[in-house]
Amino acid sequence: MSNTPPFSGAISVFGDEDTGLRIECSERHASAIASHLNQRGFTCGAPETAIKGTDRIHNLVQFTVSSNPFDVLKAEIADHLKAEGVSTTEEYFHLHGEKHIRFNLTNVSVFDK
């Protein structure tokens, strides 16, 4: 049984051999994550809306990240979330040519607007 509550917020990190690193998350978290990563030597692209939100849920955005390997990026996001008091569970998905980790935010709901 999963320890992830229903309607948990999530942050996904992708490392693709062809397109590089990217992050998908609620726009609520994007600027804080990008700011943290920029301070740690990463370069973050501008967020683009992937899925438009509603009056109760923020937009889902995605942005590129460069200048460090996938595992370093994953560790920096985990450290940032921990410092912000966000508890998480992690799910790993690996396809040929792509690494993907999803941080399920166990104490943050998609409805926290």
Image (spheres, rainbow, N blue to C red):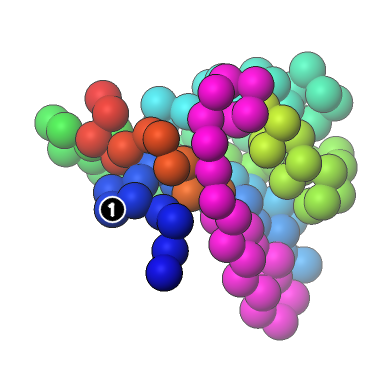
Q: Nearer the viewer, residue 73 or 80?
A: 80
* Secondary structure of residue under mark 1: loop
> So how many labels did they put on this image?
1
The amino acid type, in three-letter code, at marker 1 is: Pro
| Residue 97 location (% of width, % of height) | 74, 75
Residue 3 seen in render: yes
Q: Which residues are magenta?
A: 81-102
Residue drawn at x 16%, y 33% is: 56
Q: Residue furthest front?
A: 1
| Quarter of the image that includes the N terminus | bottom left
Q: Is 55 left or right of 111, judged from the image as shown?
A: left
Q: Residue at x 67, y 36 (%)?
A: 77
- Left or right of 88, for residue 101: right
Q: x and y percent of residue 7 in the render?
A: 28, 49
Image quarter of the C terminus: top left
Q: Nearer the viewer, residue 31 or 4?
A: 4
Choose between 6 and 35: the one closer to the eye.
6
Foreground: 18 or 34?
Answer: 34
